[in-house]
Amino acid sequence: MSLDLPASFERTVGLLRAVAEPTRLRLLALLARAELTVGELCDILGQSQPRVSRHLKLLGDAGILDRFREQHCVYYRAPAGGGGREAVRALLALADPADPVLERDRMRLQDVIAARARAAVAQLSAGRAEGEDEVFPEEIERGLFRALGEAPIGVLLDVGTGGGRLLALLSAQATRAVGVDISRDALRLARTNVHGAGLSHCEFRHGDMYRLPFEGAAFDTATIDRVLGDAAEPVRALAEITRTLHPGGRVVVVEDFDRLADLHPNPIAVLRQWFAGAGLECVRLHPLDTESRHLLVAIARRPLPASAAA
């Protein structure tokens, strides 16, 4: 089997050395499936924190591990994009997925994810927890995909991800998916829901929709589900989302029709005004009705530069 690793000989040797140890290979296999803390990894592996931390440092030094902080917690994961992601895939392809050690680690990972779910639901308010347990009815799922059309989703950003419901729905068509929320409890629940469903190419970050923790032009598609109607400054939030999109990138807004009607007699006009204020071009407005919901799906696009559009 040929490894699609970086061309540099020294870099390739460094990667092979980094995983040429049983615990580090086990760590890499786990972190390719979910974002985990040192404590969670210790529980899964049955090893001490200093030992696990030392192995994590070596993987990080080799460039095949990402690390980020959320308040008092530090999360680790295999790279979600770029050459690091491809290197990890190639390395893990050498391991037998039916190996009893790796199978046991996967079972313990599911136990950790289940414990997260219990803790997250306990910390969320009863109303929020119940709302995040919902799934989209099939007719809404079909309507969303009709509205999106055939254009590829590419790299996806879900703002106000909550329990990760919309992210999970669309992530199968995304090359990479990132959910962001200001609630750390919601992020814990989202990680549980999405990683528990085996969607390992999804990541989650803590952040404010008015100041997203991403560089400009980092995403192809952004989604925001029933958040803007309750936002103090919806145009500002949309402008910040627009900043993170590539030129030509799309924003998909799902909103409750009745909530928008409380703001203005013409809900469609409200969405058009918000898009215009954020520098977006409205592409499509699509009603989605079920017995219990009356929704609007709106799609807008970040304009291409004048030279590219010509």
Image (spheres, rainbow, N blue to C red):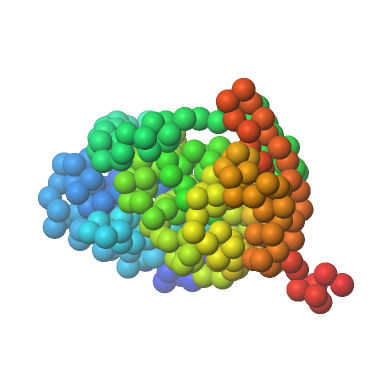
Residue at (52, 62) in percent of width and height = 233
Q: Residue at x 36, y 65 (%)?
A: 62
**Depth check, front residue: 244 or 60:** 244
Residue 293 in picture, x, y percent from top left: 59, 30
Q: Nearer the viewer, residue 59 or 291?
A: 291
- Residue drawn at (32%, 46%) of the image: 185
Task: Tell whether 87 sits left or right of 288.
Answer: left
Task: Residue 194 in the image: state x and y as whole percent.
Answer: 43, 39
Q: Quadrant of residue 131?
A: top left
- Percent coordinates x, y for residue 90 in the rendering: 48, 51
The percent coordinates of residue 134 (x first, y second) are 47, 30
Q: Residue at x 37, y 35 (%)?
A: 127
Q: Nearer the viewer, residue 237 or 118?
A: 237
Counting every numbered tag in the picture gives 0
Outermost residue, bottom side: 307
Quadrant into which the C terminus falls: bottom right
* Viewer can see residue 176: no
Q: With 31 as the anchor, is 39 left or right in this view?
A: left
Residue 273 at least partly seen = yes
Residue in front for this viewpoint, 58 or 138: 138
